[in-house]
Amino acid sequence: MPHVVTQSCCSDASCVYACPVNCIHPTPDEPDFLTAEMLHIDPYACVDCGACVRACPVGAIVPDRKLNAKQSRFLEINHDFYDGTDRSGSTVTGASGRSILAKPIPLTPITKVDEDLRVAVIGSGPAAMYTAEDLIKRPGVQVTIFERLPDPYGLARRGVAPDHQTTRQVTELFDLVAANPRVKLLTGVEVGKDVTIDELQQQFHAVVYAVGASTDKKLDVPGAETVTSATEFVAWYNGHPDYADRTFDLSGERVVIVGNGNVALDVARILAVDPAKLTETDIAPYALQALRDSKIREIDIVARRGPAQAAFTVPEFVGLVDRPDITLAVDPAELVIDPETAALEASGDLPHATKFKLQMLREVAARGDAGASDDRLIRLRFMRAPSAIGDGAITLVRNEFQTDADGRTRVVATDDVETVPESLVLTSVGYHGRPVSGLPFDDRRGVIPNAAGRVDGMAGVYVAGWIKRGPTGFIGTNKSDAQETVRLLLDDFNAGRLASPARTAAPTESRLR
Ligand code: NAP
């Protein structure tokens, strides 16, 4: 009987290396690791030893005999990922390209032993904590983490929805890192204000910026400047001190969320769920009260493309689609499939995640719940782009697919326009990084320009996480990302390319205590 990866998978791949038969994929060295929406256990290769269960930081792995009703879909999802694997003979690589031999990533050792390596990490979210975790695997490394807020762990604490408590368990792993005697975690310290960059460079061999993407992408339509973003709503209900005094008008009937990524799903779920179910969570008390007083009945999630391009992930949608307490609605007429996806579906070659998204969306559409229920309703809309927001309504233009002469398909606006009354619009079109004083910045991508973590043109300065690669992936994606940065940092240290700190003690740290 196999084990199964379920919804809260964080993709940090701890399970991959714990598995004695390498049956969990994609592994960080496989090409689809960064695009996969979760990890999957091969039901044929799993020996049911449970090593992965102990390694998983978020309790996402369950023996199939213990799956509850809401998790049962994950059996098929895990199984399907390996569909087509050639299991004949003692081959090391199946037809799916999945290696059956473990391929551990070698740990870069420290070969320069005449001095300890001192590293400052800016930020204390997942990318920062995985950076520190990886660095201290070597003796003789000291890490100081600087966090602006009074409490640590960034989006692992202030971004994960309060009803996703298992995902938040990853902070227990970060607690272990922070408790290491060679790690100092300084909270309430803002680099650039309480500590200067010059001071850091005098005290540390290297500075790693893991400051995330702390603002939103902006929606470029008239009236968008008057509305707020879903990420601010998330920060508000999670008690982020910068957002605690915000107010959101929940006195009307309908919220429209623009964009259909996982943030949109989180926000819609929190707005739709019975607030009584949130009382046991650590949602901010003021937000819980506002949700109790809420008059919202309908939450529309509006996407400009089709169901095959949905930005939400399969595990997150499974977590919504099988809930008896939330009504979902999809208009079958909006499940428009682009020609490439249609061709792949016809030939049975749909990508794994697309296949499950389409399957579940069609299932919801077939249920025919569209708007009839007294429950709070989440309506998933497709092929609609906002063209104006204001006066209690959002104007949506219907899009359609068009294939260009070069064979590329894109969405184009039609003349078909509708006006949807709303009492609140939240834009959920992705996060965006902010510039860091003194460092180069790519404003279009919202990242600090870098080569695999080395900041362009700046010796001893590195990046990890969203400020390095942009706002994609899951909490655990930051682990392999941080490891890549650490490998280069150690290469530079070993090669003598990092200037020794002018001060061996850390006056800044003692001043801050
Ligand atoms: P996201 O996944 O990048 O989704 C952004 C959405 O906004 C997409 O639907 C995108 O549509 C749409 N969009 C972008 N620009 C637009 C425009 N100008 N007009 C209309 N729509 C526009 O962003 P996110 O939801 O903020 O999530 C960020 C990352 O955090 C993701 O990797 C996500 O998986 C992760 N996350 C994970 C979890 C979890 O695992 N539970 C929870 C929250 C966030 P197009 O695709 O058409 O561009």
Image (tube, rainbow, N blue to C red):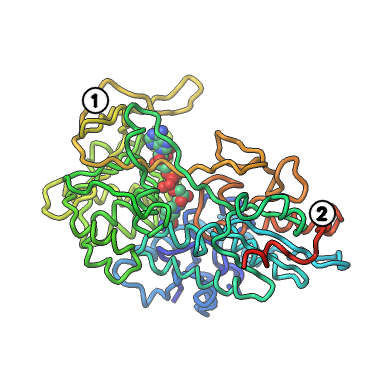
Residue found at the far bottom of this picture? 49
User: In the drawing, does residue 462 fall left or right of residue 158?
Assistant: right
* C-alpha separation, residue under disc 1 versus residue under disc 2: 59 Å
Residue appearing at x 80%, y 58% in the figure: 501
Q: Nearer the viewer, mark 1 or mark 2?
A: 2
Q: Identify the residue at horizontal 33%, vertical 60% (top origin).
A: 319
Residue assigned mark 1: 417
Q: Position of residue 403 (x, y in %)?
A: 42, 24
Q: Is residue 293 left or right of residue 444?
A: left
> On the picture, is 215 further left or further right than 400?
right
Front residue of this view, candidates 55 and 19? 55
Q: Is residue 310 above or below residue 499?
A: above
Q: Are marks 1 and 2 in contact (CB under 8 Å)?
A: no
Q: Residue 84 at x, y = what percent?
A: 50, 56
The residue lying at 42 percent from left, 59 percent from top is 160
Q: Amino acid at mark 1?
A: Val
- Count the numbered circles shown: 2
Say above or below: 275 vs 242. below
Residue plotted at (55% across, 39% down) = 446
According to the image, label 2 marks what residue?
A: 498
**Element at label 1:** strand
Specify the farthest residue to the front. Answer: 511
Q: Position of residue 340 (x, y in %)?
A: 43, 34
In terms of image quarters, where does ligand 1 lie? top left
- Quadrant position of the N terminus in the picture: bottom left
Counting from the top left corner in percent of width and height, residue 120 is at 68, 59
